């Protein structure tokens, strides 16, 4: 997926051939905020405006602008991968959950 980033927010990017327009939405928030443009420049400007408008709205309403996450996540794996993860976790003396949490934390820290 192509994305834009502005003020810590991520916007998805897609293209409608039928309408000849780029469009997207702000990801990771409670609510739906869309933006669009006929060029990359227009799309980027519309995304920045959408984020600024969203932040202004949140401030006016006294609400937290980021989406709230529970911290609980279901992960789907193939049965073979599930078996391999279980074996590695057992070998390390930790739960499958702890193994996956550690793997995700390592991957995220490498990306940031």
Image (cartoon, helix red, strand yellow):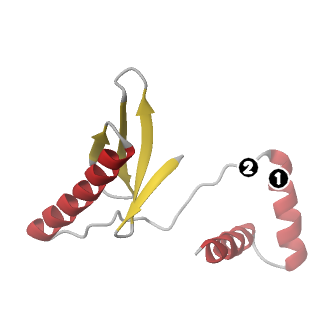
The image quarter in which residue 54 lies: bottom left
Residue drawn at x 69%, y 76% is 106
13 sits to left or right of 37? right
Towards the viewer: 19 or 105: 19
81 sits to left or right of 49? right
Towards the viewer: 74 or 39: 39
| Mark drawn on residue 77 | 2
Q: Residue 30 location, x and y as percent?
A: 30, 56
- Can you identify the residue that label 1 sits on? 81
Residue drawn at x 82%, y 71% is 89
Q: Residue 65 location, x and y as percent?
A: 26, 67
Local packing at callout 2 (Cα closer than 10 Å; few below 14, some 14-19, many 20+) is few
Q: Quadrant of the C terminus?
A: bottom right
Say what secondary structure mark 1 lies in.
Answer: helix
Residue drawn at x 24%, y 70% is 64
How many numbered marks are there?
2
The image quarter in which residue 74 lies: bottom right
Q: Residue 21 location, x and y as percent?
A: 35, 32
83 sits to left or right of 13? right
Say what secondary structure mark 2 lies in.
Answer: loop
Towards the viewer: 13 or 101: 13
Q: Residue 11 location, x and y as percent?
A: 39, 53
Q: Is residue 19 visible?
A: yes
| In the depicted structure, whether residue 85 falls above or below residue 42 | below
Residue drawn at x 32%, y 66% is 66
- CB under 8 Å between discs 1 and 2: yes
How far is disc 1 from disc 2 in space, using C-alphas? Answer: 6 Å
Towards the viewer: 11 or 70: 11
């Amino acid at each position: 997926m192509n994305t834009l980033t502005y003020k810590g927010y991520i916007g998805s990017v897609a293209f409608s051939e039928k309408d000849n327009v780029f469009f997207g939405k702000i990801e990771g928030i409670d609510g739906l905020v869309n933006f669009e443009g006929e060029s990359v420049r227009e799309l980027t400007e519309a995304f920045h405006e959408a984020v600024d408008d969203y932040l202004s709205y949140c401030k006016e309403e006294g609400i937290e602008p980021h989406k709230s996450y529970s911290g609980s996540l279901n992960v789907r794996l193939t049965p073979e991968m599930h078996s391999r993860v279980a074996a590695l976790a057992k070998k390390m003396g930790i739960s499958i959950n702890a193994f996956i949490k550690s793997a995700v934390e390592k991957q995220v820290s490498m990306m940031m």
